[in-house]
Image: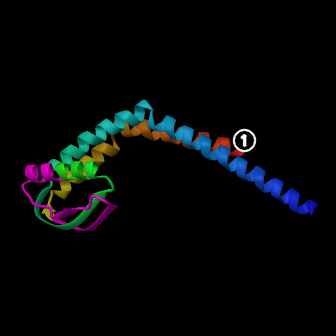
């Protein structure tokens, strides 16, 4: 019986140690996401995404979706955004609202074109950017900090 209690105590200590590690990782991840390097990378990424989306030419869209958020007001807002997107893009999306359930199912098919060379150039510029280099440095420090903590506990 004493062996059972000793093993249980050791298992509880291991669980507490693992919880401490997870809490520390979550705190460090929050620090990483709130860092200036990440916010700079995020802004650069948004600019890059806009440039990429400008060069995508959608020719054909087929869809048959059922969308619901579980609440009528937010489902209506989602369909308002879909209507705005259809008006701005000049295409039609077939979607059925479900005001009672949280659901997102169906199929979506899009066909179009873009210049692959331009996409590769943009990705190469992003990889060589100072924003990515600064974030990569922050991430490496984050990894070292987590490894160090795991050894301490």
Going 48% across and 37% down the picture, which residue do you hit?
32
Residue 73 versus residue 101 in the image, above or below: above
- Is residue 55 at all visible to an observer of this figure? no
Check the picture and name the quadrant holding the N terminus.
bottom right
User: Label 1: how many residues lie within 10 Å, few (<14), some (14-19) or many (20+)?
Assistant: few
- Is residue 80 at all visible to an observer of this figure? yes
Front residue of 58 and 14: 14
Range of magenta residues = 82-110
Q: Which residue lies furthest to the right in this view?
A: 2
- Total label count? 1
Q: Where is residue 90 in the image (x, y as percent from the top left)?
A: 6, 55
Residue picked out by circle 1: 152
Going 87% across and 57% down the picture, which residue do you hit?
6
Residue 25 versus residue 58 in the image, above or below: above
Can you tell which quarter of the image residue 44 is in? top left
Q: Where is residue 17 in the image (x, y as percent from the top left)?
A: 71, 47
Q: Position of residue 140 (x, y in %)?
A: 52, 41
Front residue of 134 and 106: 106
Going 20% across and 44% down the picture, which residue do you hit?
50
Going 15% across and 55% down the picture, which residue do you hit?
56
């Amino acid at each position: 019986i004493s062996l059972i209690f000793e093993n249980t105590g050791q298992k509880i200590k291991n669980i507490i140690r693992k919880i401490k590690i997870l809490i520390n990782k979550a705190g460090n991840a929050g620090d990483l996401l709130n860092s200036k390097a990440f916010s700079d990378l995020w802004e650069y990424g948004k600019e890059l995404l806009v440039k990429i989306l400008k060069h995508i030419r959608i020719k054909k869209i087929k869809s048959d979706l059922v969308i619901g958020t579980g609440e009528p007001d937010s489902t209506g807002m989602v369909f308002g955004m879909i209507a705005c997107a259809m008006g701005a893009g000049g295409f039609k999306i077939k979607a059925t609202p479900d005001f009672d359930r949280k659901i997102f199912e169906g199929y979506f098919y899009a066909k179009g074109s873009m210049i692959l060379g331009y996409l590769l150039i943009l990705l190469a510029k992003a990889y060589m950017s100072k924003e990515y280099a600064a974030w990569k440095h922050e991430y490496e420090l984050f990894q070292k900090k987590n490894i160090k903590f795991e050894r301490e506990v």
